[in-house]
Structure formats: structure tokens, C-alpha cells
Image: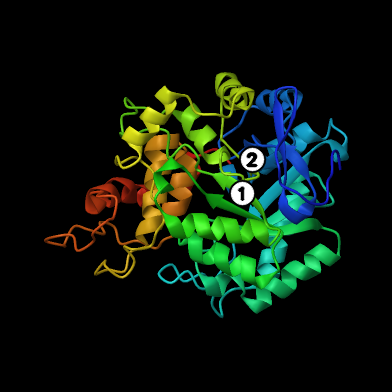
């Protein structure tokens, strides 16, 4: 599988590409990979391959399956050992308040969905199979699902096992490090977490345990405002995440050739300039479209709404304009029609100072948008 080393996550530079080793997987990959979620142009994937991208991240639910189909079609034209594919499958039966998996979590259904992903990708195996969206310690070590994942790995249908996490990241990453089960963790990580000591400690512990760490949401939603008139310095933000040696690669979701060039250009010089550091310092505590996923808000809402999920849908809507993904996420939450309408005052306090009720009212409208509005 291309370049492989067995230890050391130290960076190595070849030309304009900076490589790191993805933990104990031994996979040596550029620190800039590709998040395919919003991409729908096959030529953009081809351009990324030509630039030197080797790791492509997708998921069972992205673009209602079309994301995996598109990626699979493109990769048919390339040798199987020249790229690395990670896909994600969400488990059923998740308690949205606690994040725990329950008796309704069906490992057989998880396997069925994964086989559909393999068919879409036109592959016999993926390099990394992630459990999508774990957010509690219990979910990380849920025994029925671990047994199914181990079976899938033993059958050669996934070379490595990981999970993605958007909420409560320090705790779930810490649990992964202690479990000894997972090869890879895909986590939100960006400059707005700079003061979050628990997060940095968890990343350090996981890397020391041999877990490959992939950073997503490195650009903190890319904008501060709904109208996208106040952009974040995304190049500086990506550099900031990659300056942490425990982050082995990142998956910026570029959707244009210019964004591909901009993301890849950070490897020419990973160091932050004085101006870039100033931009990030000024922006670190500003309210952006990104939710930390700290879970402090859980339990504060009198209606028990899954606020972190709603805030992620808000970012998809206004930061990424990933409307299909926002609609799918919100529709999965079983919301009342107007979830905040009969509350005289919002009881939720956000550590970032977000106006939670206003954001919920904006994004909850996706609940009533028909799924077939988006082309299957």
C-alpha cells in the first residue's frame, strides 16, 4: 500500500508533500487528504489524486449514497494500492441525549449498510471503516458492535477500524485509547479548541497508544456569519491543526479546484506567519458557525433536544451549504414542528455564547423539507 513505515509519526517532506504515519496502521500519507462529503465533481477527485492525495473520506449517507458511487467510479481507473478509502456507517439505536448505543442497536443492520457501501464503491474492501458519530464512552466499547467490527476486519472487508466523533470528543478519544481496539479516530479539531486542555490531552494519549488521528472541521465552519461575508482565514486554520504533531492528516472538504490548491499549498510552509497567528488569535473566541461539541448544553434543554446535532446541522446549512446533509441530519432527530415556539425563555447556556434558540429555529425548518427535493 504505497509508502509504509511501522512506527514514528514524525513528519517527512517529499517535494511539496508532507507525510505523516497514521498511527499503528503504518500508512504514510500526506497531511492534507480529501473529505469527499460535499464533492460531486469526479474531475476534482482526479485532480486531487494527481496532486498526491491518497486518503479519501466518504460515508454511507453522504449525498444519499451518491458520494460513494461517484468516488467508486473514479477510483476504478486507478490501481487499488495507489489510494486509501475510508467510509463511515452510522449505528442504529443511538440515544441522542446520552450518545449511548442501546438494545435497538443492530450489528446486522450495520453490516448490511456497510455491504451496500462496498457495492457503491465497487470494492471488495475499504482501508478504514469508521463507526459514524460516536459521542459517549459506552458507545466506543459497545460489545455487540465491536464483535461485528472484528468479524468484518477478520473477513478482510476492512483493513482498519475507526470511528468519527463530533461531540464529547475528549472522553470518547480517551476511551478509544484505553480500549486498545481502534486503529483510527476521525475527530473535529480546530483553532477554536486551543484552550481546551482535555482535548489536547486526549489526542496526545491516543497518539501514544498508536491510534491514527484524522482531523476534520479544521476550518471551524469557514465563516463567522450566516451570510458568509466574514470568512475565517481557512489556510491559517488548517495550518494550526497540522502544527499539532499528534494530528496525522486532515480532510478539508474542498469543492473547487481553487480550494484544492489552497488546501494543498499549506504544505509549502506549515509555519504560521505573524499575520496568520494574529488572525487566529482574534478569531479564537469569536462566535462562528462551528459548535465545539462539548456537550455542556445537554440536559439544559427542557425538551431534551439534541442541541449539538442541531448546531452541526446549522453549520452544514450556513457554513457549507450542504443542504442535503443538513436536511438528513435534522430529519433524523424526530423534532416537533416548532421545537422552541412555546418556550418563554431558552434555558440553554452555551459556553461559546451562541443564541441557541435562534439557531434551532432556523435549522429545524429542514424537518419539513421533502427528501425527494434532493436528487437521489
Q: Earlier in the sequence, mark 1 or mark 2?
A: 2
The answer to whether residue 79 is above or below residue 246 is: above
The answer to whether residue 34 is above or below residue 168 is: above
Q: Residues within 10 Å of mark 2 (few under 14, many from 20)?
A: many
Q: In terms of secondary structure, where does tag 2 sit?
A: helix
Residue at (83% x, 51% y) in the render: 6
Which one is nearer the viewer's eye here, 305 or 208?
A: 208
Which one is nearer the viewer's eye here, 35 or 180?
A: 180
Residue 296 at what x, y percent from top left?
33, 63
Residue at (54% x, 75% y) in the render: 138
Residue at (56% x, 80% y) in the render: 103
Residue at (26% x, 67% y) in the render: 300
Residue 185 at what x, y percent from top left?
63, 56
Of badges 1 and 2, the one in the foreground is 1
Quarter of the figure that contains the N terminus: top right
Question: Farthest residue toward the left?
Answer: 344
Residue 32 at what x, y percent from top left?
64, 34
Q: In terms of secondary structure, where does tag 1 sit?
A: loop
Question: Farthest residue toward the bottom?
Answer: 103
Quarter of the image where one finds residue 202: bottom right
On residue 246, which mark appears?
1
Q: How many marks?
A: 2
On residue 67, which mark appears?
2
Which one is nearer the viewer's eye here, 22 or 37?
A: 22
Q: Is residue 332 left or right of residue 161?
A: left
Question: Farthest residue toward the front?
Answer: 274
Quarter of the figure that contains the C terminus: top right
Q: How many angstroms separate mark 1 from mark 2 (CA)?
A: 29 Å
Q: Is residue 174 left or right of residue 180?
A: left
Q: Residues within 10 Å of mark 1 (few under 14, many from 20)?
A: many
Quarter of the image where one finds residue 264: top right
Amino acid at each position: 500500500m504505497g509508502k509504509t513505515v511501522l512506527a514514528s509519526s514524525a513528519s517527512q517532506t517529499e517535494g511539496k508533500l508532507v507525510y505523516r504515519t497514521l498511527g499503528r496502521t503504518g500508512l504514510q500519507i500526506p497531511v492534507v487528504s480529501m473529505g469527499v462529503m460535499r464533492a460531486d465533481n469526479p474531475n476534482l477527485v482526479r485532480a486531487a489524486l494527481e496532486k498526491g492525495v491518497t486518503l479519501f473520506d466518504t460515508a454511507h449517507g453522504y449525498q444519499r449514497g451518491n458520494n460513494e458511487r461517484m468516488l467508486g467510479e473514479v477510483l476504478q481507473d486507478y490501481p487499488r494500492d495507489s489510494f486509501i478509502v475510508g467510509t463511515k456507517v452510522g449505528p442504529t439505536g443511538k440515544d441522542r441525549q446520552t450518545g449511548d448505543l442501546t438494545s435497538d442497536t443492530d450489528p446486522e443492520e450495520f453490516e448490511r449498510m456497510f455491504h451496500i457501501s462496498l457495492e457503491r464503491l465497487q470494492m471488495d474492501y475499504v482501508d478504514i471503516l469508521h463507526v459514524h458519530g460516536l459521542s459517549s464512552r459506552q458507545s466506543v466499547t459497545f460489545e455487540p458492535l465491536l464483535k461485528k467490527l472484528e468479524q468484518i476486519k477478520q473477513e478482510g472487508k476492512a483493513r482498519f477500524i475507526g470511528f468519527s466523533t463530533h461531540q464529547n470528543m475528549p472522553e470518547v478519544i480517551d476511551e478509544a485509547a484505553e480500549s486498545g481496539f481502534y486503529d483510527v479516530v476521525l475527530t473535529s479539531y480546530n483553532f477554536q479548541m486551543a484552550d481546551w486542555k482535555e482535548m489536547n490531552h486526549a489526542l496526545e494519549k491516543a497518539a501514544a497508544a498508536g491510534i491514527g488521528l484524522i482531523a476534520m472541521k479544521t476550518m471551524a465552519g469557514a465563516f463567522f456569519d450566516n451570510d458568509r461575508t466574514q470568512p475565517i482565514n481557512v489556510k491559517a486554520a488548517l495550518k494550526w491543526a497540522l502544527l499539532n504533531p499528534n494530528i496525522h492528516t486532515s480532510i478539508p472538504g474542498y469543492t473547487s479546484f481553487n480550494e484544492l490548491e489552497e488546501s494543498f499549498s499549506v504544505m509549502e510552509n506549515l509555519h504560521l506567519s505573524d499575520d496568520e497567528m494574529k488572525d487566529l488569535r482574534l478569531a479564537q473566541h469569536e462566535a462562528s458557525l462551528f459548535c465545539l461539541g462539548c456537550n455542556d448544553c445537554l440536559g439544559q434543554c427542557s425538551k431534551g433536544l439534541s442541541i449539538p446535532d442541531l448546531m452541526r446541522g446549522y453549520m452544514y446549512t450556513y457554513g457549507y451549504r450542504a443542504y442535503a446533509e443538513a436536511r438528513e441530519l435534522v430529519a433524523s432527530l424526530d423534532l416537533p414542528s416548532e421545537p422552541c415556539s412555546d418556550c418563554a425563555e431558552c434555558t440553554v447556556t452555551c459556553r461559546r455564547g451562541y443564541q441557541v434558540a435562534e439557531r434551532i429555529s432556523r435549522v429545524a425548518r429542514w424537518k419539513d423539507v421533502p427528501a425527494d427535493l434532493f436528487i437521489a
